[in-house]
Amino acid sequence: MSDNSILVSMIVCCLNESDYIDRCIDSLLNQKNISGNFEILVIDGMSTDSTREKLFVKKEFHSEIKIFDNPAKVKPQAINIGFRESTGKYFVICDAHSFYDEFYISTCLELIYEHPDAWCVGGPFINIGETDFGKANAIAMNSPLGIGNAKHRHPNYEGYGEMVMFGLFPRMVLDKVGYYDERFIINHDDEYCYRLRKEGGKVFISHSAKCFYFVRKSPKSLFNQYFSYGFWQIAFLKKHKIPISIRQLIPFAFFSSIAVLSLISFILGDKWIGLILPGIYIGILFLASIPILFKNGVKVAANFPLAIFILHFSYALGFFSGIFRFSLKEFKNDMQPNYLTKK
């Protein structure tokens, strides 16, 4: 249901984001050059830190803020609650672990007016690291060496792409594409934008729309994040029969090749066969760290190869684990198309 008085509905998903929620909401409240009213729908996954208290304090002073509970505590359900409760002509999916340039929404509106074939527009997010490892991770996640040709992660990209993280959509997309598939706990944005493109829409990305994302601070948290991305990529493959992009198969193929060569090396008794690919890989990571050393210092440069390795290896390991988890039987029973419709 749409209320003509609301131009944009901003859907913010959060769970225990007390360190970031104020900055996120303030950045949305301070959006400029929006030629209409807006609302901010915060979908909270029953936070147990001070997130909820901070939200209700802000709500007292800003009528634009509406707060909803998400008992499921995962993002696709939160987004679907936002879809059902929003009233704007356009909606934008936001994340509490981020904040947004004061012209982000108005720039996205301009982009969607300028590109009528686009059903989703947004900007490639700018990564922010808060620790030495986090800073290295931020560089890695903006580097082709780390994330390949993922256009939504290249900070200077302008053009069409596969998906965008914090996208603005016209409301008619709900009629064309439906809601998020709530079985995709991870990779839900990729899956939704794939369905959008399959229905004939396009995704347009512009560096003029600036948003900022706080990357994982530690090796363990980064490993868990990218393990889950690789794991849920198998669910996507089972449902749609094809990968979103060939780049998403490369980490698994690369480390599988290392395993095969290591086995051959063991059988033949020639250790050099198993060391060829790891040696080349380590050499590339070392060379890529040199400019980071001069620009960002020793600590960040030392963490950069580790961040790149974790990005690749954890994704490959998650992909391998997903192959066993999403068996053919489970796919037939559980992975049939099943996205919510409007209620």
Image (tube, rainbow, N blue to C red):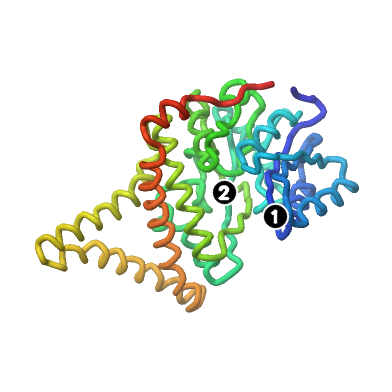
Q: Which residue is identified by label 1?
A: 17
The reply to whether residue 100 is in sight is no
Q: Position of residue 318 (x, y in %)?
A: 41, 49
Residue beneath the point at 51% across and 31% down: 202
Q: Quadrant of residue 9?
A: top right
239, 132: nearer the viewer:
239
Q: Which residue is identified by label 2?
A: 207
The reply to whether residue 76 is in sight is yes
Badge 1 or badge 2: first in the primary sequence: 1
* Label 2 Cα crowd, 10 Å radius (few <14 / some 14-19 / many 20+): some
Q: Amino acid at mark 1?
A: Glu
Side of 186 relative to 113 (left or right): left
323, 39: nearer the viewer:
323
Q: Quadrant of residue 314?
A: bottom left
Q: Label 1 to label 2, Cα distance in Å?
A: 26 Å
Q: Position of residue 154 (x, y in %)?
A: 49, 52
Q: Amino acid at mark 2?
A: His
Q: Position of residue 64 (x, y in %)?
A: 83, 40
> In the displayed structure, would residue 124 be above or below residue 289?
above
43, 284: nearer the viewer:
43
Quadrant where the N terminus is found in the figure: top right
232, 132: nearer the viewer:
232
